[in-house]
Image (cartoon, rainbow, N blue to C red):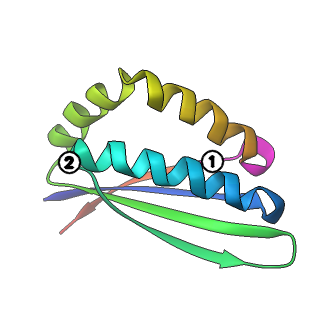
């Protein structure tokens, strides 16, 4: 079964360019580690609502990739910057199995 990681959060529109810069760099690093992902955006007056979906061949593979990513110093720095623009510091994270 494929393992799927789901993230949902929102960013104020004034921070959207910074979010894009952070996300583009992070996606390059994650892709090099074997992560397939997609982003879904919905913009309203004040906020952009974002859903990110990451696909892994299995939960075991996800754990292996996560360890590698967590050791990356650039990712640590990007995550800190990312969380500074996530509205209310509210990041919803869920796990799913694709069957």
The spot of residue 44 in percent (x, y) is: 79, 79
Residue sitting at 70 percent across and 46 percent down?
90
- The correct choice, above or below, for 83 with respect to 80 in the image is below
Q: Secondary structure at mark 2?
A: loop
Residue 10 relative to residue 66: left or right? right
Q: Residues within 10 Å of mark 2 (few under 14, many from 20)?
A: some
- Image quadrant for the N terminus? bottom left
Residue 91 — which label?
1
Residue 89: say if magenta: yes
The spot of residue 39 in percent (x, y) is: 47, 68
Q: Residues within 10 Å of mark 1 (few under 14, many from 20)?
A: few
The span picked out in magenta is 86-92
- Image quadrant for the C terminus? bottom left
Front-most of residues 92 and 66 = 66
Residue sitting at 50 percent across and 26 percent down?
76
Q: Secondary structure at mark 1?
A: loop
Front-most of residues 37 and 9 = 37
The mark nearer the N terminus, 1 or 2, is 2
Residue 34 — which label?
2
Q: For the image shown, how many numbered marks are present on the structure? A: 2
Residue 35: say if magenta: no
Residue sitting at 83 percent across and 60 percent down?
14
Circles 1 and 2: CB atoms closer than 8 Å: no
- The correct choice, above or below, for 34 with respect to 73 in the image is below
Residue 12 relative to residue 69: left or right? right
The spot of residue 92 in percent (x, y) is: 59, 51
């Amino acid at each position: 079964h494929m393992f799927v990681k789901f993230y949902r959060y929102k960013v104020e529109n004034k921070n959207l360019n910074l979010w894009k810069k952070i996300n583009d760099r992070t996606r390059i690093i994650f892709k090099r580690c074997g992560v397939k992902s997609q982003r879904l955006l919905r913009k309203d007056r004040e906020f952009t609502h974002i859903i990110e979906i990451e696909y892994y061949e299995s939960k075991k593979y996800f754990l292996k990739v996560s360890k590698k990513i967590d050791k990356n110093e650039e990712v640590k720095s990007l995550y800190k910057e990312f969380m500074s623009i996530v509205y209310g510091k509210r990041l919803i994270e869920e796990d799913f199995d694709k069957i």
